[in-house]
Structures are given as structure tokens and as C-alpha cells.
Amino acid sequence: MSHISIRDLQKMSGEKIEALPGPTAVKSGNRTVGLLIPFKRSDPDRMAAILARAEELNKGRDRAADDAALAAIGVDPTDWSVEAVRAFLKERSKKS
């Protein structure tokens, strides 16, 4: 399905939207007015394997050297790990 009309979209269930093969144009007459991108449920086992692999690759890395290299090429080196964000929020709530 290359596109759907607004009228078709009004009649579609969540299950039908999830079943779309990928991004689908939404048209009003001949004019494309939007893009419908169905969310796919992730496979928890696959996600766990990816996260485990990322943790393995992270072992032995020099965080300071990585941050310096990122900053040198203009990339934000902020630590967005769950632990770092929780620590930031905890510190910020103490100041409020």
C-alpha cells in the first residue's frame, strides 16, 4: 500500500495500522498531507541481547578520552545513562 486517504485512515483500527508494512503516505485527494509510521513492538529477547552486547563493548573504555574525542568533533558528550540522569534529577530536586 503506497498511500491511504484520510477517509480510509478514519476507518482503520489500531491493529490495521500496526500491520502496515512501513511508513505510508496519507493523502487528501492528490495532495500528500501526512505520513503514518506504525510503531512495531520490540522483541524483548532481542533488546536484551543488544543491551548485553553494548555493555560488553563498553567494558574497558576510557570515558574521559571518549568525551574529549566527541567534544573535539562537536558531539555532545553528555552522559545520558539511566544512572547519570537519576543522579542529575536527584541533585536538581535537592536544589528546589
Image (cartoon, grey):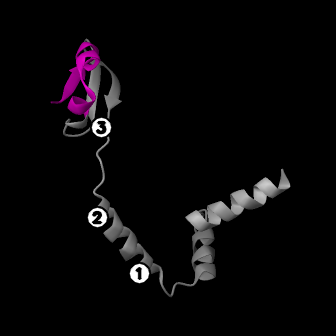
Q: Nearer the viewer, residue 92 or 30?
A: 92
Q: Is residue 11 magenta?
A: yes
Q: Which residue is identified by label 3?
A: 38
Q: Which residue is identified by label 1?
A: 56
Amino acid, disc 2: Asp
Going from N to C along the chain, the mark reached first, 1 or 2, is 2
**Where does the magenta region start and end?**
1-17
SS for callout 2: helix
In percent of width and height, residue 46 lies at: 28, 64
Going from N to C along the chain, the mark reached first, 2 or 3, is 3
The quadrant where residue 85 appears: bottom right
SS for callout 1: helix
In percent of width and height, residue 65 lies at: 60, 82
Disc 3 residue crowd, few under 14, some 14–19, many 20+, Cα 10 Å: some
The quadrant where residue 71 appears: bottom right
SS for callout 3: loop
Going from N to C along the chain, the mark reached first, 1 or 3, is 3
* Image marks 1 and 3: residues in contact by CB distance under 8 Å: no
Does residue 81 appear to the left or right of 47 in the view shown?
right
Disc ID at residue 45: 2
Relative to 96, does residue 20 appear above or below in the rendering?
A: above
Q: Between tags 2 and 3, which lies in front? A: 2
Outermost residue toward the bottom in this view: 60
In percent of width and height, residue 32 lies at: 31, 21
At 60% across and 63% down in the image, what residue appears? Answer: 74
Does residue 37 appear to the left or right of 72 in the view shown?
left
Amino acid, disc 1: Glu
Outermost residue toward the right in this view: 95
Q: Marks 1 and 3, how far apart in space? A: 32 Å
Amino acid, disc 3: Pro
